[in-house]
Amino acid sequence: MSIKSKENSMEIQCDSCGRKPEFYFGEWQAAWSRAKADGWRASKDNTGAWCHECPDCFEGTT
């Protein structure tokens, strides 16, 4: 997973397909709240690392 903080945005990368939209909030919590509202999901893998999935990939795993 890749999360990059830019000047006024956060970029969250989907661990399944690589999609990387930018969320235009300077703070992580606000950006992640918006991402969740848009259908993004996070879960821990078997090593305890966080994984993020975009709405398209999450729909394919449910």
Image (spheres, helix red, strand yellow):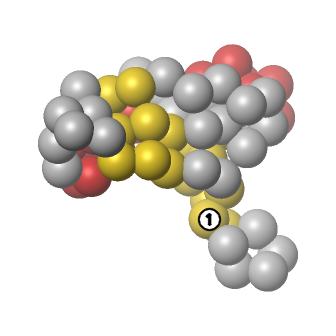
In the displayed orientation, state which residue is furthest to the bottom: 47
x, y percentage for residue 46? 82, 75
Seen in the picture, residue 46 relative to 38 is either above or below; the reply is below
Left/right of residue 53 with respect to residue 37 in the rendered view: right
Can residue 34 be seen by looking at this rendering?
no
Seen in the picture, residue 1 relative to 9 is either above or below; the reply is below
Can residue 11 be seen by looking at this rendering?
yes
In the displayed orientation, state which residue is furthest to the front: 7
Residue drawn 27% across the image and 52% down it: 28
Residue drawn 59% across the image and 50% down it: 2
Q: Mark 1 points at which residue?
A: 50
Residues 60 and 17: in front is 17
Residue drawn 79% across the image and 80% down it: 47
Left/right of residue 49 with respect to residue 29 in the rendered view: right
Seen in the picture, residue 47 relative to 55 is either above or below; the reply is below
Q: Is mark 1 on a helix, strand or loop?
A: strand
Quarter of image, res 43: bottom right
Residue drawn 66% across the image and 37% down it: 14
x, y percentage for residue 25? 19, 35
Left/right of residue 60 with respect to residue 28 in the rendered view: right
Q: In which quarter of the image is the C terminus?
A: top right
Specify the amino acid type for callout 1: Trp
Label 1 CA crowd tier, 10 Å (few <14, some 14–19, many 20+): few
Quarter of image, res 48: bottom right
